[in-house]
């Protein structure tokens, strides 16, 4: 354990959660809370969250990473990404009690980005969001993304045609799979424009995921850094959602939103070069707050 890294045990509705606070020199008043999504704990894929927190702290920005209930070293039952409000609030409470902060930025990848959106508009202490490859999964959206990106790239692949000409291609299986994808694509579109919220109230949990996220984004109304990978179906699905929704387009064109496209990166920014560029973008954007 480094001298500037403090393990913290804190309470969330009767369960003990574990986090690591990374202290920084310089008296920064904004800290970064890293929320973990999916089957991950506070270290992250390729130790990404450890390295990010240390990078932030070395640049004068305090950071905290933690395990939500049911993950890593935290107690309690496992929660879905859309059930993390209490966990995030407890972590913000702990972080701000441990470090002299005025506000926090929440940093989240994939469904942690979605969880951050669900929470942020409810807490005035959240000054901004860093959202990477947000999770907006629906069966229809996933099918459209798969059809547009996977099947098109597969059809243009020399490996595909080599298998065809060598009679090693499973035509029946491919036709069944393609038909299933088409069936999902032709389902009725989401009623994305039917929802409107004008005040900071609880947003209906029963809304389709992309619509619920859009309404939370609208309610938040503070600076957002959005980073999208180029080699990632999750990011591709988010782009399709935005392309089909004029409200999403208007929200992302707001001056408060900074967008960074990263064409060569995969979902988890798995190379040192990609990870370091994301960390650098995050630091520069947070300093501008």
Image: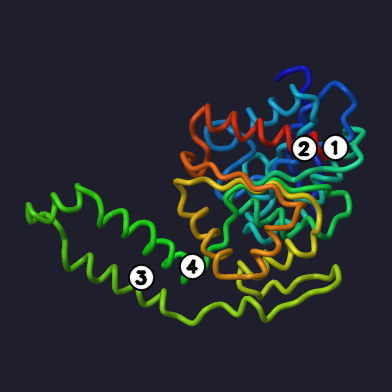
Q: Camera-side residue: 181 or 42?
A: 181
Q: Position of residue 24 (x, y in %)?
A: 81, 24
- Quarter holding the N terminus is top right
Q: How far is disc 4 from disc 2 in space, using C-alphas? A: 32 Å
Q: Are marks 2 and 3 in contact (CB under 8 Å)?
A: no
The image's mark for residue 179 is: none
Residue 221 at x, y percent in the picture: 80, 58
Separation of marks 4 and 3 at Cα, in angstroms: 10 Å
The residues bearing labels 4 and 1 have C-alpha atoms spaced at a distance of 36 Å
Residue that badge 1 annotates: 30
Q: CA distance from mark 1 to mark 3?
A: 45 Å
Cα–Cα gap, marks 2 and 1: 8 Å
| Label 4–label 1 contact, CB within 8 A | no
Q: Of discs 2 and 3, which sits in the foreground?
A: 2
Residue position marked by numbered label 4 in the rendering? 141
Q: Marks 2 and 1: which is nearer the front?
A: 2
The C terminus, quarter of image: top right
Which label's residue is closer to the chain start, 4 or 2?
4
- Badge 2 vs badge 1, beta-carbon distance below 8 Å: yes
Q: Residue at x 56, y 77 (%)?
A: 190
Label 2: element kind: helix
Tell me which numbered mark, 2 or 3, is placed earlier along the sequence: 3
Judging by the rendered image, the residue that carries numbered circle 2 is: 286
Identify the residue under disc 3: 181
Is the Cβ of the residue at disc 4 closer than 8 Å to that at disc 3?
Answer: no
Identify the secondary structure beneath mark 4.
Answer: helix
Q: Secondary structure at mark 1?
A: strand
């Amino acid at each position: 354990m480094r001298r500037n890294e403090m393990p913290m045990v804190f309470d969330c509705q009767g369960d003990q959660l574990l986090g690591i606070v990374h202290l920084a020199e310089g008296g920064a008043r904004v800290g970064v809370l890293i929320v973990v999504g999916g089957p991950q704990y506070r270290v992250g894929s390729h130790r990404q969250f450890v390295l990010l927190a240390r990078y932030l702290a070395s640049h004068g920005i305090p950071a905290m990473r933690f395990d939500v209930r049911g993950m890593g070293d935290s107690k309690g039952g496992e929660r879905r990404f859309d059930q993390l409000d209490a966990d995030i609030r407890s972590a913000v409470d702990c972080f701000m009690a441990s470090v002299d902060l005025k506000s926090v930025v929440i940093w989240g990848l994939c469904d942690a980005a979605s969880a951050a959106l669900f929470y942020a508009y409810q807490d005035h202490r959240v000054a901004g969001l860093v959202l990477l490859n947000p999770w907006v999964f629906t069966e229809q959206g996933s099918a459209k993304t798969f059809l547009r990106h996977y099947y098109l790239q597969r059809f243009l692949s020399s490996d595909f045609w080599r298998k065809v000409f060598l009679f090693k291609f499973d035509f029946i299986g491919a036709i069944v799979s393609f038909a299933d994808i088409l069936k999902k694509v032709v389902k009725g579109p989401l009623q994305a424009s039917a929802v409107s919220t004008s005040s900071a109230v609880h947003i209906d949990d029963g809304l389709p995921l992309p619509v619920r996220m859009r309404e939370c984004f609208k309610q938040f109304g503070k600076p957002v850094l959005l980073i999208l990978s180029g080699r990632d179906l999750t990011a591709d699905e988010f782009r399709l959602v935005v392309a089909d929704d004029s409200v999403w387009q208007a929200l992302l064109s707001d001056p408060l939103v900074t967008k960074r496209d990263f064409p060569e990166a995969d979902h988890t920014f798995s190379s040192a070069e990609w990870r370091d560029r994301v960390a650098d973008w995050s630091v520069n954007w947070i300093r501008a707050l």
